[in-house]
Amino acid sequence: MAFEDLPVGVTFTTEAQAIGLQEILDFARIWDPQPFHIDAEAAAASPFGGIIASGFHTMLVAFVLTLRAGVWTDASMGSPGMDEIRWLQPVRPDDVLHVRAEVVSSKASTSKPDRGFTVIRYDVHRADGVKVMTYSATHILRRR
Amino acid sequence: MAFEDLPVGVTFTTEAQAIGLQEILDFARIWDPQPFHIDAEAAAASPFGGIIASGFHTMLVAFVLTLRAGVWTDASMGSPGMDEIRWLQPVRPDDVLHVRAEVVSSKASTSKPDRGFTVIRYDVHRADGVKVMTYSATHILRRR
């Protein structure tokens, strides 16, 4: 796949992956040690009512799923940024997540003829269909 | 600190932290295994000219620095989202990063009197002053 293969409107769906309690704790202890991510008692007493995954953890699980989907992976030259990251619902232990993606913008670079900028909107869903997170990423993709 | 202590205009700066080659590789192998993050030869041949940190890694190092700064940490009730994440410069092994933060919006919740929404803009700088990343996060903060 190259930049040209991902015009506006292309969609893809990733495989699903479970996010377990131990992973949630291990990730959050390093990267987001807030009580509602790492302390079962404090989490139970919080508005969340129990341990929830760090939003960064959810984002990374989603990102790896999209990378593994292999749609833009081989063409990737990095990313200048992401927009409108929204954590819509808490992600709890044993939730199973998958990602639905849609290309929303595609522009060839005006200064570098070897690449283009592809904006993809990602929606992260639980197995029951509820959308738990959404974000857009700009990918720099190699042209043919 | 509570929501009320962080009106628009408040600024703070975090401590600095180095990001080493081994950490970059370890993080990227799990969360962002693209060649320019994990493969020295491929990275050298890429437009980056060598291994660079995953943008997610830079984001998390910055986030932990802000959490450790302790400005909003005790008041935190989570986050509904982030905006305008921009990776401005590659982060390379042994770069030393710190974060400068500024409150850009502060609004009490209209539905829940115990909390408010505080938007903070974060600029991630290298030791030489160059800004390598910027992003905004909305924090839900406890009111007094």
Image (cartoon, coloured by chain):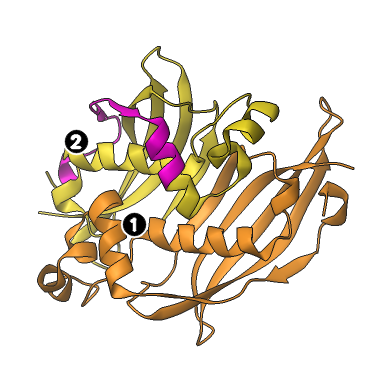
Chain colours: A yellow, B orange
Q: Is residue A5 magenta?
A: yes
The residue that disc 1 covers is: A79
Q: Earlier in the sequence, mark 2 or mark 1?
A: 2
Compared with A123, B36 (above or below) is: below
Instruction: Give the SS element for disc 1.
Output: loop
Chain ID, mark 1: A
What range of the chain is rendered magenta? A3-26
Residue, x 61% and y 50% (percent of image)?
B137
Q: Is residue A23 magenta?
A: yes
Residue, x 40% and y 29% (percent of image)?
A123
Compared with B75, A125 (above or below) is: above
The residue that disc 2 covers is: A69
Compared with A81, B98 (above or below) is: below
Which mark is drawn over residue B37?
Answer: none
- Number of callouts in the render? 2
| Image location (x, y in percent) of residue B18 | 44, 77
Quarter of the image that includes the N terminus of chain A: top left
| Image location (x, y in percent) of residue A2 | 14, 47
Dot 1 alpha-carbon crowd within 10 angstroms: few under 14, some 14 to 19, many 20 or more: some
- The answer to whether residue B108 is visible is yes
Residue closer to the observer: B21 or B9? B21
- Which amino acid type is marked by label 1? Ser
Q: Are marks 2 and 1 on the same chain?
A: yes
Residue, x 32% and y 31% (percent of image)?
A101
| Image location (x, y in percent) of residue B108 | 84, 39
- The answer to whether residue A104 is visible is no
The image quarter containing residue B51 is bottom left
Q: Closer to the observer: label 2 or label 1?
A: 2
> Would residue B64 be found to the left or right of residue A101 on screen?
right
| Image location (x, y in percent) of residue A94 | 39, 23
